């Protein structure tokens, strides 16, 4: 039997406890999970560089031996294929997430019918947490330490010092 590998793509700017929850639940389904930081130069300027995000995520996931963290450019489905994965994992918090993610999944399906998308609902504890809200709170000196892994909380404090 071959290993079931999935890719969990995203910008992860920053990586939250909600993202961590999706990782942990995906590991209950897949043998190997690749957290893939999208290096998209067309998106608005991120708070953390791609290298910083990869570093922070690796720190948050240091105890997870079946998880790899990397970055990529280009089409997500092509990256997944290059990694031997035929599944993309996407986390959902609300209906608005589903609408946008469904459009993306349908286009990915058109581009690569052999790559499937699996949606994992956020746990109730993280349903209201988004990276943009966290950055906003942290920029005003608010405490987000219970919403992000410790290394990310420290990095946010340093960014907004």
Image (cartoon, helix red, strand yellow):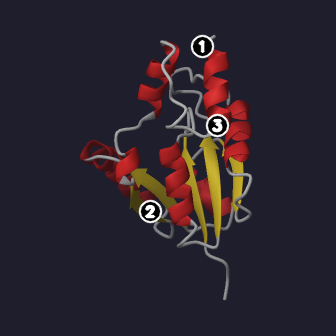
Tell me the distance, in whole angstroms, between the alpha carbons under discs 1 and 2: 35 Å
Answer above or below: position of 112 versus 143.
below
Identify the element where label 3 is drawn. helix
Q: Give percent across and percent down for residue 88.
A: 51, 60
Q: Earlier in the sequence, mark 3 or mark 2?
A: 2
Q: Earlier in the sequence, mark 1 or mark 3?
A: 3
Q: Give percent across and percent down for residue 58.
A: 72, 46
Identify the element where label 1 is drawn. loop
* Residue at 35% in and 45% down: 127
Q: Image quadrant of residue 84?
A: bottom right
Asked if residue 48 can be seen in this view, the reply is: no
Depth check: 18 or 145 in front?
A: 145
Q: Nearer the viewer, mark 3 or mark 2?
A: 3
Identify the element where label 2 is drawn. strand
Asked if residue 142 can be seen in this view, the reply is: yes
Depth check: 105 or 6 in front?
A: 6
Q: Image quadrant of residue 110?
A: bottom left
Left or right: residue 35 compared with residue 131:
right
Tell me the distance, in whole angstroms, between the alpha carbons under discs 3 and 2: 30 Å
What number is the disc on residue 47?
none
What number is the disc on residue 160?
1
Task: Classify 10 Å Cα crowding around label 2: few (below 14), some (14-19), many (20 and above).
Answer: many
Q: Give percent across and percent down for residue 42.
A: 53, 27
Task: Classify 10 Å Cα crowding around label 1: few (below 14), some (14-19), many (20 and above).
Answer: few
* Residue at 66% in and 89% down: 1
What number is the disc on residue 117?
2
Q: Which residue is mark 3?
A: 150
């Amino acid at each position: 039997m071959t290993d079931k590998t999935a890719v969990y793509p995203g910008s992860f700017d920053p990586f939250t406890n909600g993202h961590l929850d999706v990782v942990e639940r995906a590991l209950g389904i897949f043998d190997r999970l690749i957290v893939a930081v999208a290096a998209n130069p067309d998106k608005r300027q991120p708070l953390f560089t791609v290298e910083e995000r990869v570093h922070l995520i690796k720190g948050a996931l240091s105890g997870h031996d079946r998880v790899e963290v990397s970055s990529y450019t280009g089409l997500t489905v092509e990256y997944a294929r290059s990694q031997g994965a035929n599944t993309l994992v996407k986390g959902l918090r609300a209906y608005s997430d589903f609408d946008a993610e469904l459009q993306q999944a349908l286009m990915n399906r058109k581009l690569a019918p052999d790559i499937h998308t699996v949606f994992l609902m956020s746990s109730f504890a993280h349903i209201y947490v988004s990276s943009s809200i966290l950055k906003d709170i942290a920029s005003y000196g608010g405490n987000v330490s219970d919403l992000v892994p410790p290394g990310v909380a420290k990095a946010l404090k340093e960014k907004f010092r």
